[in-house]
Image (tube, helix red, strand yellow):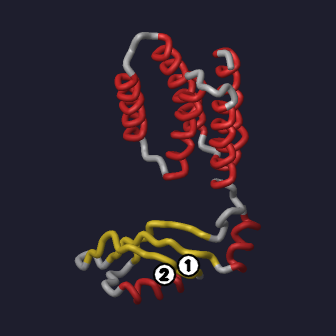
Amino acid sequence: MSLTQLFVLDLVAISILVFAIYFPRHRRRDMVVALLGINIGVLGVTQGLSSADVSAGLGLGLFGVLSIIRLRSTEMDQTEVAYYFGALALGLLGGFAVEPNWLSAALMAAILAATAISDHPRLFRRYRQQVITLDRAVADENEARRHLESLLGAKVHNLTVRSLNLVTDTTIVDVRYELNPLEARVTEALS
């Protein structure tokens, strides 16, 4: 596959990732710029490194620095991190010609398919995760579970007490829960 074809394939793939999968689901405009920028930047750097007499170690080091800078600049949830690395991978695949010729296209398609399927709104639609501050100090995990289930109207699958403050009488809990089917339908109807 020629470099021109790889570049076009990358532009099509990143457009699908950003405008057909990410933005319609998450509506975060600043991430559109970040995803497009990182993809095109990585595409350019990859092509530059592949045509220059530079070691692969230096190239990988540069990509690592780019990733760390971006990931540390603003808070991103795990889903956005996955999109971010998908955009990075698409740029890498678009910048290097690999053998056999069809491999880059197949890997790009696999990234898009995995992202589209794993982030589909209907997949695990009743499951949620939140960090909740309770207005009382709850040291007993079973008591916290019962209180959260009552408060959320949901089945708590996992909870982790992040902070227990006996002075301010608060508890901060990271809770993973599943909406009951009726609550899930109501939530879907409202969104």
Q: Residue at x 69, y 58 (%)?
A: 121
Residue matched to label 2:
148
The count of marks equals 2
Q: Which residue is mark 1?
A: 152
10 Å crowding of disc 1: few (<14), some (14-19), many (20+): some
Quadrant of the image for the N terminus? Answer: top right
**How far across and down, in percent of the image, does residue 44 sit?**
53, 18
Q: Position of residue 34 (x, y in %)?
A: 53, 33
Q: Secondary structure at mark 2?
A: helix
Q: Quadrant of residue 12?
A: top right
Circles 2 and 1: CB atoms closer than 8 Å: yes
Residue sitting farthest toward the left: 167
**Vertically, is 11 above or below 85?**
above
Label 2 crowd (10 A; few <14 / some 14-19 / many >=20):
many
- Spatial CA distance of label 2 from label 1 is 6 Å
Q: Is residue 169 left or right of residue 130?
A: left
Instruction: Please state which amino acid type lies under the numbered disc 2.
Output: Leu
